[in-house]
Amino acid sequence: MKAAYIESTGSADVIRYGDLEAPTPGRGEVLIRVHAVSVNPIDTYIRSGAIAAELPNPFILGCDAAGVVEAIGEGVHHAAVGDRVWCTNQGLLGRQGTFAEKIVISQDWCFPLADAVSFVDAAACALVGVTAHLGLFREADLQGGETILVVGGSGGVGSMVVQMARSAGATVIATAGSDEKCAAVKKLGADIAINYQADSLEDAVKKAAPKGVNVFWETRREPDFDLAVELMAGKGRMVLMAGRDARPSFPVGPFYVKECSLHGFAMFKATASEMRAAAEDINHWLAMGKLKANIGRTFDLSDAAQAHRLQEQATLEGGGGLMGKIVLTVN
C-alpha cells in the first residue's frame, strides 16, 4: 500500500511517500480503506521532533481519516465491513498514523459516518471537531444564552467552536486576521467578527459585550491573560488549547476576585467514551448540515510534504494564506 511516512524526525523533507506492508486487524481492531485524511499542527510537531515521542519506524503520519471498513478483528462490535467511518486520535502515544491507503485502528476511535457526509468533510472535522466539543461542553460547560469570544475563529478548531457554540444557542464573537476571514467567520455563524489587524480587540469586545464574555476561547500560542480577565464576565471560563512553550504573566488578583476559571486540556487525553459522545454530536450536526467543514486547501496524499510545509507556515509563521483545514485525498 502507499503511505506518507518518516524514518527519522526533521523538516518536511524527511517525509517519504512509497510502499509499506498493509496492516491486518487484531482483536478489537478495524481495517479501514482510507479515502481522506487531514493535517493538524500536532502532526508537524511530531514529525519535526518538537514534541518528543517514541515512534514506530517507519512512522506513518496523521491523526485523522475517513473511509470504509474492509475487515474487522475478533470482538469488534462498533463497526462492520462496508461501514463508512471516520477516526481521530491516531499517530499519538505510539499508535501509527493515518496517511496511508489502509490503516488499522482500535474500534474505540472508530465512528460511523452518514451517507450524506463526504469523506473529505469528515476528515476535516475530526480532530478539530472533537477538540472544540470537549472544550466547549466538557470543560467550559457552555450554556444557551451565554456569550463566547473565539480568538482565531477562522482556523481549524476556531471554526468548529464558532459553529458548535452557535448551535448551542450562544452569542458568538470571533476574531480573524482580515476582512475576508471575518466574512467567512460570520458565514459560519458568528454574530460579530472582529478584524484584529485593523481594530482594537479590547474596545471591540467591550462594545459588543459590555458585561463581559462568559467563555474566552484562546487559540494563540501566546495568551494575553491580562486582556482575557479584563474581558471576561464574573465566573467567566477561559479555555486554553495552545501555547505549549508559553510562559506569560498572570493577573492572579483580578482572576480570583472575578471568580474566573482556567481550563487547559489536550484532546488526545480524552477517554474513548468522551470522544464517542463528542462524535455522536458531530455526526448529527454534519448530517443535518449544522456543522460544515472549513477546508482551506486540498492535496493528494503523495503531496504530504508540501501540505506539511503549508501547515507550518500558517501555524508557526502566520503566513501561507491558509484559512481552514488542509485535507489530503487518497485515491
Image (tube, grey):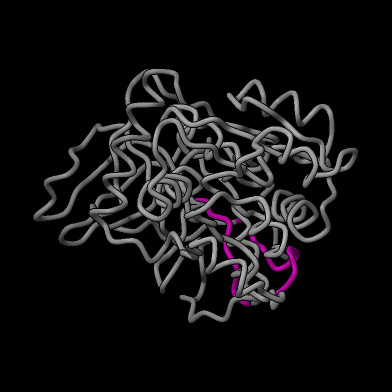
Closer to us: 321 or 248 = 248
Residue drawn at x 76%, y 35% as measured from the top left: 194
Q: Quadrant of residue 104?
A: bottom left
Residue 14 horizontal side relative to residue 198, left or right: left
Q: Position of residue 212 (x, y in %)?
A: 61, 44
| Residue 12 shown in magenta | yes
Residue drawn at x 81%, y 27% as measured from the top left: 180
Q: Report the span colored magenta.
A: 1-17
Closer to us: 28 or 203 = 203
Q: Position of residue 111 (x, y in %)?
A: 29, 41
Q: Position of residue 210 (x, y in %)?
A: 66, 38
| Residue 74 shown in magenta | no
Q: Position of residue 34 (x, y in %)?
A: 43, 41
Residue 124 horizontal side relative to residue 22, left or right: right
In the current view of this chain or complex, which residue is farthest to the right? Answer: 198
Q: Quadrant of residue 38?
A: top right
Reply above or below: 31 against 296. Answer: below
Residue drawn at x 58%, y 44% as measured from the top left: 213
Residue drawn at x 70%, y 49% as measured from the top left: 307
Residue 106 visible here: yes
